[in-house]
Image: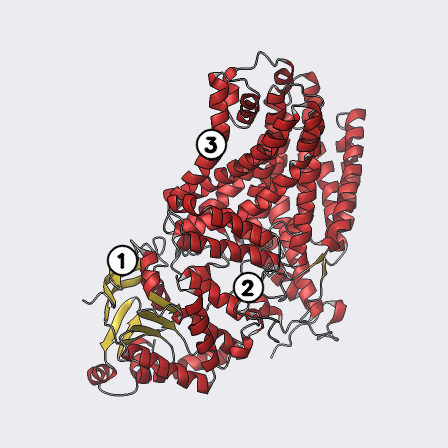
Amino acid sequence: MDGAGIEVRGLRKRYAGGPWVLDGIDLSVAPGTIQGFIGPNGAGKSTTVKILCGLIPDFEGEVRVAGCDPRVDPVEVKRHIGLVPENAALFDALTVAEFLLFVGRLKEVDDDVIRRRGQTFLEVFELADRLGARIGELSKGMRQKVLLTSALLHDPRILFLDEPLSGLDVNASILIKDLVRRLADEGRAVFYCSHVMDVVERVCDRIAIVDDGKVAAEGTFDEIQARRGGGSLERIFADLTSEGDVAPRVDRLIEALDS
Amino acid sequence: MRPRLGDPWHPRSRSALLLPMVLGAVDRLERPLRALGVEPVAFRALLGLRVELDLRESSFVGAGAGAGKGPSFHVGLALITTGFWLAGMMPGVAAFFVEDSFLWLALVQGMLLGMLLMVLLAHFATLLVDGTDVGVVGPLPVPGRTLFAARLGHTFVYMALLAGVYAVWPTFLGCFRHPPLRVLLLVPLCTALTTLLALAAVGLLYAGALRAFGPRVFQRVVLWIQVVTATLAFGGFQLAGRLLPARALLEATGDRPAWLGLLPPFCFGSLFEVAGGRLDELRWAGALVALLLPVAALAVSVRLASAHFASALAGGGAARGPRAVWGPPWLARLGPGRGASPEERAGYELGLALARREPMFVRAIYPQLFGFTAMGVAMTLMPGPAGEILADAGAAMALYLLAVVGPGMLEMSQMGSNPEARWVYHLVPHARRERVLAGCARALYLGTAVPAFLLTTLLFTCLRGPTFLGDAAFAGAAAGAIVLRAGRAMSLSLPFLGPFVPGHLNTRNLPVVFGLLGALAAVVVVHVLLRLLHPVGPLLAAPLALAWLALEVRVPGGPRLVREPDEPPELDPGGGAQGRSRRPAT
C-alpha cells in the first residue's frame, strides 16, 4: 500500500498474561480517507491508537504508519502524525503561545512557521486574545482548540482524533468537522474515534466497529448498513456490541437504587 | 484571564539568570550531545521547559501536568540547600586537621558523593522517571535518548546547586591549609565531577533497568531499585563509618594501599597530587579516573537509554492483574469501628490502598522506613566491648528514627499521581473532608509505620536477644504517642491529591516537626538513663509509656485540614464538627 496511510495486519495485544485486548485487528486507511473507529468501552480503541502512534512498543502483528513500523521507529512515526487524545494532558503553567512554541519545536517546525500557523488557527478558533493566558485558565473547549492547533502545527500526513469535538460548542464542532473533511480531501489519512454515532456516520468515509478486540464490521456506512439489513449506525452498533435489551438492565439499576 | 504584557509569541523567562545560564551551557554542548545521539534542539526545548516550569508558581489547586511549583517546593529546596551549605563546613574545617591533601580532598568529595546519592535516591531521582508530563511529550517525535538526557540535565541543575553551595566552605577554608591555587582550581572541578558521577550512577541504574526489563515493567522496577538503593545508602553510610579504617587511613598516610587512589572518591586526591607535580603512574591513572569516569559513566548511561523511554515513563501500556482491593483483611479490621463516620472509614481504606500503590509515596517513604532500620543494623555492628552497649542503644535508636518518618509520611500523603481527581471532594463539606483525612492518617500509621516498627523489632530481637523486647515496648509506645500528638497538630491538604513536588516542605508544619524531634530527643535521653540504671529499666517503664500511648489513641480526630482556595466558606453547617452527618437513606 501507499506509505502515507495506515496498514494493520493481525494486530494482537495483551497485558501481563491477561486476556487479549486486541485479538487480530486488520485495517487499512488510505490517504484521503476518514476512517471511523468505534466500539464499546474497553473494546481496545485507545490501545489501538496508542500502538499506531508508537506509544506502546510490545504487540504482535504487522503495523505500518506512514510506511514506518512503530515498534522499530516510533520517533519516525510520530514525525508524520498528529494526535488529539481523548484525555489530553497540557502544561497548565504555560501560556498558549509558549505551549505551541514548545510543541512545534519538538516537531521540528521553524519558529516563524509556528507563530504564523498558530496565530491563524487561534484567530479562526476565536482564541487569539488568549495567546498570553495560561492554559490552566482556559475552559475545556478552549483547551481542545489549543490541542487541535498543536496537533496540526507540523502539517501531519496522518491524523489521529479521539473524540475531537469533546467540549466544543456547536459552531466550533461544525468548523472542526468541515476542517477534518478538507484535510482528508487534501490527501491526509484521518483515524477518527468517537462515541457520537451520528457524527461518525456523517463524517467518516469508512467505519470499523471493534468489539472484544476484534473488528466486528468494517466498510462504508452504506456497506455496513446493507450487510446488517438497514438502520442507523447507532442501532447497528447496539446490535453488534450490546449485551441484550436495555430495558431490563435499566430495571436492575432502578431496583439497586431502591434496595 | 488577561493576556500578559508584551508579545506572547516572544515569551520571557521568569528567571533572568538561571534559565539563560542553563540554555547557554546547552548551546555550548551541541557537539558532544550529537555525538551521544541526543538531538540538541529537542534537548534544549525539554530542559528549558522543565526548568522554566520549576520557576513558575502553581496557581491551581487541582492542577495536573506541568502546573508549576508551589511555595513548599522553594522552601524545601532552600532548606536542603542550606543543609548542604552547612554540611560543607565539616570537610572545610577538616582541612586544618588532615594534613594529607590526598585524604582531605577524598573526604570532601566522598562526603559530597554520599550526600548527593542520598538526596538523589530519596527525592530527586523521581525527576528522571516522573510520568506526569508524558501525556504531552509522549506523542511528540522525541527520541527516548533525548528525553532521558533532558531528564538527567534537569536533575543535574539541582545537584549542581547543592554541590555548589557545599563546596563553598572547603574551597575557602582549604586555601588556608593546602596549596591555595590548587584548592581554588581543583575543589570546584572535583565537585562538578563528583556531581556528574552521582548522577551517572543513578542514570546507569535506570537506563540499565530499562534495557534489562523493558518499558512495560520499568516504572515498577525503578521504584524498587530506588527503595533498595536508598536503603543501602542509608545503611551503607553508617556501615562505611563503622567498618572503614578511617582512623588508620588518616594516621598511616604513607602506608595506604597504592590502588586506593584509583577508586572514587580517592581518585580526586590523586588528581590533586598530580596537579602538585607528583607524577608516578598510579597517581596519573587515578587522576585520569577522576577526570574521565564521571563523564564516561554519564555518556554510557545516555547511550544505554532505550528508544522506548517515553513509553516506559507512561508505564509501557502495562496493566496490573486483579488484586485485593483494600489490602490484607486484618488491616481492614483494624480500621475505624462501627461508631466512626463513613468518611473516616472511607479515608482509612483510601489510605490503606494508596500507601502501597501510589508510586510517589512509596518512593519517598519506604526507603526511609527500610533505611532507618538499616542504619540501626549498621549501628549494632559496632566492634569492641563498648560496641555491645552502643549496639543496644543503636537498635533502640532505629525505633525512634522510624518515628521521625511519621510527619514526613503525612506530608508525602498529600501528593499523588492524579491531582485532577480532586473533583471527588468538590461537593463534600469541609468537616467531612477532615474526617476523610483523619481516617487516612490512621491507615498510614497502622498500614505503614506499625508494620515497619514490628518488623524492625522482630529483626533486632533476633539480633540482640529477648531483652530487646523491653526496649522495643518502651520506645514503640513513647514514640507512637509522640507521633500521634504531632500528627494531630499538623495542617495538611486532601490526601493523595497534590502534584508531585521534590523536596516538598510545608512551613506550616515546621514547628510541629521540631517539636516532635525535641520530644523524641527527650525520650531517648530517658531511655538511655533507664538502660544505664538497669538492663530491664526500659521494660519496667514500658507500662507508663503504653498508658501514655493509650491516652493519645483515645483522643479523637486527626490532622487539621487546610481549607482549599476554591472551597466555599462552609457547605455543611448541620454536619459541622460533630462529625456524624450521614446521607439519608432513601
Q: Is residue A131 above or below residue B119?
A: below
Q: Which mark is residue A35?
A: none
Q: Is residue B138 above or below residue B94?
A: below
Q: Residue at x 71, y 19 (%)?
A: B386
> In this view of the protein, which residue sits in the foreground, B423 or A90?
A90
Percent x, y of residue B135: 45, 62
Residue A95, percent from left and from top:
55, 68
**B327 or A204: which is nearer to us?**
A204
User: SS at mark 1?
Assistant: loop
Which class describes the residues within 10 Å of circle 2: few (<14), some (14-19), or many (20+)?
A: many
* Mark 3 touches mark 1? (CB < 8 Å): no
Does residue B356 appear in this view?
A: no
Closer to the camera, A175 or A112? A112
**Residue on which disc 3 sits:** B293
Chain where mark 2 sits:
B
Q: Amino acid at mark 2?
A: Gly
Q: Amino acid type of disc 1?
A: Asp
For the residues beneath circles 3 and 1, the answer to whether they share a chain is no
Q: Nearer the viewer, mark 3 or mark 1?
A: 3
User: Helix, strand or loop at disc 2?
Assistant: loop
Residue B245's x, y, as percent? 61, 19
- Tag 3, which secondary structure? helix
Tell me how far mark 3 sits from mark 1, CA to CA: 37 Å
Mark number, residue B64: 2
Residue B586, image quadrant: bottom right
Q: Nearer the observer, disc 1 or disc 2?
A: 1
Q: Which residue is mark 1?
A: A69
The quadrant of the rendering that contains the N terminus of chain A is: bottom left
Q: In the image, is B393 to the left or to the right of A219?
A: right
Q: Bin the neighbour count of mark 1 within 10 Å (Cα to Cα): few under 14, some 14-19, many 20 and up.
A: some
Q: Disc 3 and disc 2: Cα gap in Å?
A: 39 Å
Tell which subunit mark 3 falls on: B
